[in-house]
Image (cartoon, rainbow, N blue to C red):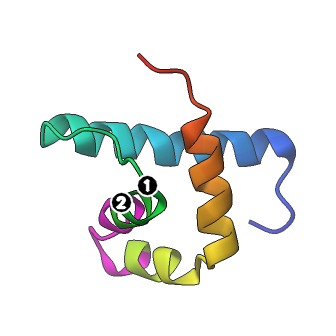
Amino acid sequence: MENPTPEQMNAMIEAIFEKTDSLLTAHDLDPPGDFTGFSELIRLVFDDDDAGRAIFASFDEKLLKTLWEIYQKRPSE
């Protein structure tokens, strides 16, 4: 997607976080407590097929850190 709108970006981020939540729930895991754990969680979310692995490989550290910052600001359930 080239130049997504803010609404599209929010939807993509929420979709990623829904997958992280599902993975954590499915394996009865606590949310990550640091950037390294979060990065590994995101890697696992995208590790289900070649396309997902390619998407994760395209993430740079700046994007991962931005996602981590957003993830940390999510309300606790």
Along the line of sight, the residue nearer the viewer: 34 or 10: 34
For the point 12% across and 43% down, which residue is it? 27
Prevalent SS, magenta region: helix
- Give the left or right position of residue 22, taking residue 2 as reference: left
User: Callout 1: few (<14), some (14-19), or many (20+) C-alpha neighbours within 10 Å?
Assistant: few
- Give the left or right position of residue 70, taking residue 6 as reference: left
Amino acid on which the number 1 mark rests in the picture = Asp
Q: Are marks 1 and 2 in contact (CB under 8 Å)?
A: yes
In the image, is residue 43 part of the stretch drawn in magenta? yes
In the image, is residue 7 part of the stretch drawn in magenta? no
- Give the left or right position of residue 15, taking residue 31 as reference: right
Taking the view exactly as shown, the residue that stands out farthest to the left is: 27
- Where does the image place residue 32, in percent across and percent down from the top left? 36, 48
Amino acid on which the number 2 mark rests in the picture = Gly
For the point 52% across and 43% down, which residue is it? 15
For the point 49% across and 83% down, which residue is it? 57
Stretch in magenta:
41-51
User: Which residue in the structure is indicated by mark 1?
Assistant: 34
User: Which residue in the structure is indicated by mark 2?
Assistant: 37
- Where does the image place residue 64, in percent across and percent down from the top left? 59, 65
